[in-house]
Each structure stands twice: as structure tokens, then as C-alpha cells.
Image (tube, coloured by chain):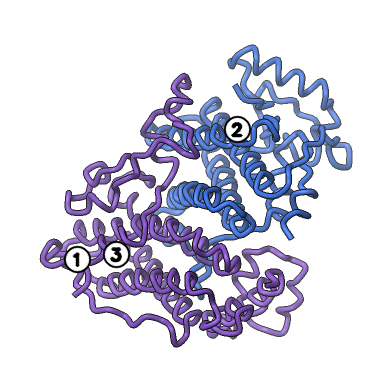
Amino acid sequence: MENVTNRPETTTSEAAASRRSFLRVAGAAAVTGGLLTACSNADQTSVVPASGARAAGPMVALPTGDNGILGFAYVLEQLEAAFYEMVLAKPYPNMSSADQMLWTDIRGHEIIHRALFKAAVGALVPQLTFDFSSIDFNSRASVLIAAETFEKVGVGAYNGAGKYIKNADYLTLAGKIVSVETRHHSILREMQYPYSDAFAGPTIVTSDTGLHLAYEPTYVLPIAQKYIFETIDASALVASLA
Amino acid sequence: MNLQNILSEIEKVDGEIFDRLAHVSRRGLFSSLTKKTIAVAAPAVMASALTSAYGQASGLPQGVKDVLNFALTLEYLEFRFYDAGRNLSMIPNNYKAAFELIRQHEQVHVRLLKSVLGAEAVAEPKFDFTAKGTFNDVFSNFATFSAVAQTLEDTGVRAYKGQAGNLMPAPAILQVALQIHATEAAHAANVRYMRGQKGWITGGTAALQGLPLVVEGNYKGEENLTQAGVNLATALAGDSRVTADMVSQAFDEILTKEDVLKLVTPFLA
């Protein structure tokens, strides 16, 4: 069971304990800055932000070099897996069987990716704690948008980080994963905008050169950070990539 | 080589990649240029940026040029396929926009790769999309057309992926190749979906993709369950949310250049 902070109360006592622990550590001050604004679930604490950013969680420093890139990927795969666990733990009303199959598949893929990176760098990068309280899991549209965002960031992250990998086997492994993340993204776009060219339209793929997204790690991490309780410190990693 | 310089060169000439890279602070550079003027020359100027570290295309390492010419051959094949199918009435209206976008992407991939290679770009071969009589109704029967499209896209993904290691000496070109690779994956998933398939590849047979046995080789190896020495189906056997099918779906496998050339040979006239 992963550390997801806003699991429904019906999940295991372990998760509930984990959540309580998070709330105790983080306190009300942690739940600010646009979080929890759209939530109606009974187990989610609605706290109106007073001001400022949420309190910083414990620091997690990513390793340098290839281990750091793998650790960076592990962070993103943990984020994705935890998100899809939430989607199916709190299914939106009237989730169709087709939708449920889609979420089940994608959740499975991300759990598998997470397990692979845990085996590779789990000794260097811990399991993280996530806070998805800014996402309305009761709304299919919101879940699709969030999922598409996570997949988009994942695709861009792998495409942007590939050039920094020194070990050819790791590069190939990243390649095996990024195309699957792209498949997810393409299908999620099609679900939002059926029978169109949105799956790879000009906001996704450059129309003049046909290139999909590529993001630098320094662009990706602040986006991911919004959903992570711990503070990810990539400064040593970034310095090692020059 | 100075990667950062090359990337900023690319951003300067390609208004869209600039958005992708999200170096928002550089937005000011574009104030005097419209996206349209940038876009017209983009493949050529981007190619110049990609090869500037090597003087010109002929200065690129031979291994990199070999990969780019291999990729160009596949892009010629894909572009000519979609161009021959362009707007044909057999394509259902629901899917015309998708196939036109895919056609345009393959066209600009050809342009970009040709620009990078310059005089060293391989010539375009002549194609036979019936594959010597295997797909005789490829441009009159949408079921055949979309099946060939899916096979070409899924195979293209595997082909690019297999060459990533050979592009490591040229990081900027590696990134571009990874981005093209992702574009092919986005195409592949969409074509699969319109054919009633999952967007991801389950197992390693043609039948599992709703395709005829003649393309069996294009999917061989996709059944793999072991990554980086870890059999993930075994490792996750206790997790009821994960199946072996999902493990095979979660990773797209590579094909070697030799495998791919063998697979596309039937399409050469």
C-alpha cells in the first residue's frame, strides 16, 4: 500500500494511519495554496489557505548522474501510480466499464514501472507521500485532465532526460517506457476530444517538425512537487548533468 | 560540444519547440518574429542547429548518419503510405482528421531528416503498399489500410527505440529522435484505438493485435516480461492489480535495424 494522503476511509487501516500521520506532521498549514479547493469528500479536510505556501516536507535529495535520472523517473512513476490508485479507489459516479478497464490498465502499467525503479534505485530514493486533494476525483472530466497532465509531463520528462543518460541500457529502458506513456497520453486525449487530431495536435506535437514534448528536469520537478509532500531536491542531480 | 548553445539555437528558430521547452524567460526573443515566419524554414534551420556542432552533416559521426538515414527510409515509407491514402473516401469521416495529421507529421519528419543529412540523405525508394499482393485492397478497404497503418506505426516505435544508443554521441539529435519516437507512439495508439484495439501492445503475436499472421514478426518480442534482469510478472505476482499482460504492455520492445529492414522489404517495389 502506497502513501496516498487522501484515500477514502474505506481503505486499509495502514493507509488511514499513514494519512493521519501525514496530517499530524504536516498540520493545517500544509494544506494551503490551492489545495483542497474543489473537494467534497467527507474525509478531506477543507482548510481555507490563510496565506503563503504550504510547509516544506522532509527533504529528499536525488542522487547524481544516471542514478539521479533513474531516481527522477522513480519520483514520476510513484506519482502516476499513486494517482491512478486514487482514481480507482474513489471512482467517479457512473464510471463505465470501458473507463474502468482503461484506468485499470494504466494503473497496472504505472505500478509496474514503479516496481522496476524501486528495484533499481529504491535504496537511494524513498517512497514518497502524495497529496492529490487539489483534484476532484468525483468528476470524470477532472480526472481525465489530471491524468493527461501527468502523462504529458512524464513523456516530456523522459524525452528531455534521455540525452543525459550515460548508460546505453538505461537509455533503452527509458525508451521502452516513454512510448507507453505516450500511448497513454494519446488515448487520454482521444477520450477528451473524440474523432479529432487532438491526440497529437499542435499543442502536443510541433506541426513544423513533428516533434513530441521534451521537458528539462528543472521544468518537470516543480510541477510534480505540487503533489508531493516531501521536498525533492534535484540540485546535485542538475549540477551533475552539465 | 555545447549542448546548451544548440538547444538555444533550436529555440531561436523553432517557435513551437520553444513552447515545448518552456524556457519562458526567453519568450522575449520572439517578440519581433511571428510564428509563421519561423515555421516556414523550421526544418532546415533546425537541421542547421543540430549539425552546427559538427560543422555540417558530413561532420556527424558515421554511426549517427547511419541511424538518420535508416530513420529517413522509414519516414519515406510512412509518408508515401499516408499520402497515397490522403482523403480517400474509404477513410471514415471520423478518422480523416487523424490520418491527415499523421500524414503531415511524417512529411515534416522526412523534411527534417533530409535537412540534417543534406547531401548524404539516402534517395527515396519506390514502394509497393500491397506488399507484393498481400494487401491488395490497402487503398480501397479501410480495414486493410488501418491495419497496415497500425503495423507501420508500432514498428516505427520499435525501430527508433532500437537506435537510441547509437545516437548517444549526438545528444541534441538523440533528443529529437526521442521526440519523433514519441510522435510515432501517439500515432500508433490512436490508430489502434480506432481499430478497437487497446492503445498498448499486449503479448508478441499479430493475432493479439487483431492483425494477420503475415505481420507476426513486427510484434515478435513484445511478450517480454523481464526488464533490467527483473521478471516483473514474477516480482508482482502477489499484486492482484497487475497481470502478466499488463507487464508486456508496460514496455515497448526494440527491434534491430536488420529486423526492421527485413520487415519492410515487402513494401519495397
Camera-nearest label, 3 or 1? 3
| Residue position marked by numbered label 3 in the rendering | B261
Which residue is drawn at the image coordinates 64% and 32% (left, top)?
A122
Which residue is drawn at the image coordinates 64% and 57% (left, top)?
A164
Which residue is drawn at the image coordinates 82% and 20% (left, top)?
A24
Residue A21 image offset from top left, x and y in percent: 77, 19
Q: Which mark is residue A118?
A: 2
Q: Amino acid at mark 3?
A: Leu
- Identify whether B100 is placed above or below A57: below
Q: Residue furthest top?
A: A13
* Chain B representation colour: purple
Secondary structure at numbered mark 2: helix
Q: Quadrant of the C terminus of chain B?
A: bottom left
The chain carrying label 2 is A
| Residue position marked by numbered label 1 in the rendering | B266
The chain displayed blue equals: A
Secondary structure at numbered mark 3: helix
Secondary structure at numbered mark 1: helix
Labels 3 and 2 in the same subunit: no
Q: Amino acid at mark 1?
A: Pro
Camera-nearest label, 3 or 2? 3
Q: Quadrant of residue A32?
A: top right
Q: Quadrant of residue B248?
A: top left
